[in-house]
Amino acid sequence: MIIILKRNAEEAKVRQLCSELESMGLSIHASQGSDEHILGLVGDTKAVAESWVLAHPVVEACRRVSEPYKKANRKFHPEDTVVQVGDTLIGGDKFAVIAGPCSVESPEQITEVARRVKAAGSSLLRGGAFKPRTSPYSFQGMRAEGLTLLEHAREQVGSPIVTEVMNTEHLPLFENVDLIQVGARNMQNFELLKAVGRMNKPVLLKRGLANTLEEFVMSAEYIMAEGNEQVILCERGIRTFETSMRNTLDISAVPMLKRMTHLPVVIDPSHAAGIAWMVEPLAKAAVAVGADGLMIEVHNDPPRAKCDGAQSLTPDAFDALMEQLKPQLTFFGKTLN
């Protein structure tokens, strides 16, 4: 249930209403927008009569919310959420580009790529330290050493770092990570979602390969229910019957998620297609459809990359892409930061 308060409602009476609702075992998610002040009720609201709520002098209207997700629901929070990672803002009219290699391979590699993508206009540096791979014989990442190299690259260029956590046991190693990524294969690892929800860090949550948008948002709800509302949703392609590319980018997910939730939505065109030449048109489509950011893989030597070289842009190609995106972002009222 959501309760819409009257304009200039008396604060003391609002506190009284909240106290009465909390005494019923409900938690309250307050959202103060430019036009409305909303109280979102989380819990079993069956016993709360709408007539009782409407009789309160500070209440303008109320309505029940049928969707199972509450904190992530745009009805509870009509204004766009803007997530801050370091000095970078993601959401609203702020557009962020996250760029870097699929995996950290050496000090020279990660530092060189970090400098190039930063110079081209990226806001955050990505790089995998722990790598979830389909084959147990594939490169699994440099693990803790990879995290150390990411931190060193951050010191050199100043970009906040983004990297994926695989399980709860690794979380102590991520204390110095600016944006924690939960990958597609872990989208419904509910214990991991709850654990990152208890951390005071922004979370980038990727959609699973075969999950519905409601399931995706419900996974975000797991994180938010633990008190962490700094969640960014990432559409990275889903598995369909098409075999000409790695996955199928669900570009329609962006406007639908924007209608369902107030959280920022970014697109990962690299994983969506798995083909470097497709990154440019998919990135442009993401901007056009209203995404809040991009996550792009960039490697200084793609043919020799230990992971996903086929989908990685060279630094020169990334430079060219960023130059093409800047006027498009301006046209759609987005600010690159």
Image (tube, grey):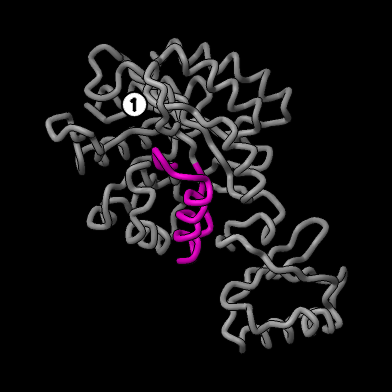
Q: Is residue 159 above or below residue 47?
A: above
> Residue 215 in magenta?
yes
- Viewer-nearest residue: 267 or 94: 267
Looking at the rendered structure, the secondary structure element under dot 1 is: loop
What is the magenta range?
A: 207-233
Viewed as shown, does residue 158 lie left or right of 192?
A: right
Task: Estimate how packed mark 1 is, as few (under 14), some (14 to 19) or many (20 or more) residues with alpha carbons within 10 Å.
Answer: many
Residue at 68% across, 82% down: 48
Amino acid on which the number 1 mark rests in the picture:
Pro
Residue 260 pos. (x, y %): 63, 49
Is residue 59 shown left or right of residue 275? right
Whether residue 67 can be seen here: yes
Q: Is residue 34 above or below residue 305?
A: below
Q: Quadrant location of residue 20?
A: bottom right
Along the line of sight, the residue nearer the viewer: 230 or 174: 230
Task: List the residue tagged with mark 1.
Answer: 101
Q: Position of residue 156 (x, y in %)?
A: 37, 31
Q: Horizontally, is 22 left or right of 315 in the view?
A: right
Seen in the picture, residue 298 relative to 129 is either above or below; the reply is above
Tell me the quarter of the picture where residue 316 sits.
top left
Quadrant holding the C terminus: top right
How many marks the image carries: the answer is: 1
Residue 281 x %, y %: 54, 16
Q: Is residue 274 above or below residue 221?
A: above
Q: What residue is shown at x 67% (from left), y 20% (from top)? A: 328
User: In this image, 288 relative to 272: left or right?
Assistant: right
Residue 237 location in percent, x, y?
45, 31
Residue shown at the point (38%, 57%) measured from the top left: 193
Looking at the rendered image, the quarter that the N terminus falls into is: bottom right
> Which of 183 and 302 lies nearest the eye of the viewer?
183
